[in-house]
Amino acid sequence: MSTIFKKIIDREIPADIVYENEQVLAFRDINPQAPVHILIIPKEEIPTVREISGEKHAGLLAAMFDAANEIAKNEGISKDGFRLVINCDKNGGQEVYHLHMHLLGGRRMQWPPG
Ligand code: DGP
């Protein structure tokens, strides 16, 4: 089932898009938890990490990590470091069931994450 992120991909609702290529879209989180908080999503509708297989999605996963590195450089957070998070299902705290990687930076992160 489609989510609000599909509407962002299709430009049906606005988002602050910072990166796009054939496979991946990235935009600023509506509820930022750090000075830089960007969501990196595949254009393909994959609900959760559980639907990912290395064999089938190697290229897509590489594209998501390439996007993270490029955006981190563009946002000026690459040198000091950043955090990448993928929440999965209820216990992981997932709210939107379209796979997404959170790119968080611009401040020192805490651990454990809570
Ligand atoms: P998660 O809990 O991992 O499923 O994170 C979902 C994130 O998506 C959450 O940090 C808020 C963000 N979000 C939800 N709806 C929208 C939206 O319409 N626009 C944008 N830019 N972000 C959204």
Image: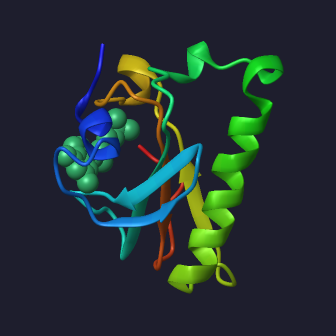
Q: What residue is at 65 percent from the left and 82 percent from the top?
A: 80
Residue 34 against residue 87 in the figure, above or below: below
Q: Quadrant of ligand 1?
A: top left
Q: Is residue 13 left or right of residue 35?
A: left
Residue 74 visible (yes or no) = yes
Total tally of numbered discs in the picture: 0
Q: What residue is at 16 percent from the left and 48 percent from the top?
A: 13
Q: Nearer the viewer, residue 66 or 7?
A: 7
Can you say which quadrant of the picture contains the N terminus?
A: top left
Q: What residue is at 29 percent from the left and 66 percent from the top?
A: 16
Residue 63 against residue 103 in the figure, above or below: above
Residue 89, position as x, y percentages in the image: 41, 19
Can you say which quadrant of the picture contains the C terminus?
A: top left
Q: Quadrant of residue 18?
A: bottom left
Residue 49, position as x, y percentages in the image: 57, 23
Q: Quadrant of residue 50?
A: top right
Residue 103, position as x, y percentages in the image: 50, 59
Q: Is residue 82 left or right of residue 97?
A: right
Q: Nearer the viewer, residue 104 or 39?
A: 39
Residue 77 visible (yes or no) = no
Residue 9 against residue 75 in the figure, above or below: above
Residue 25, position as x, y percentages in the image: 47, 51
Residue 109 against residue 56 in the figure, above or below: below
Q: Quadrant of residue 35?
A: bottom left
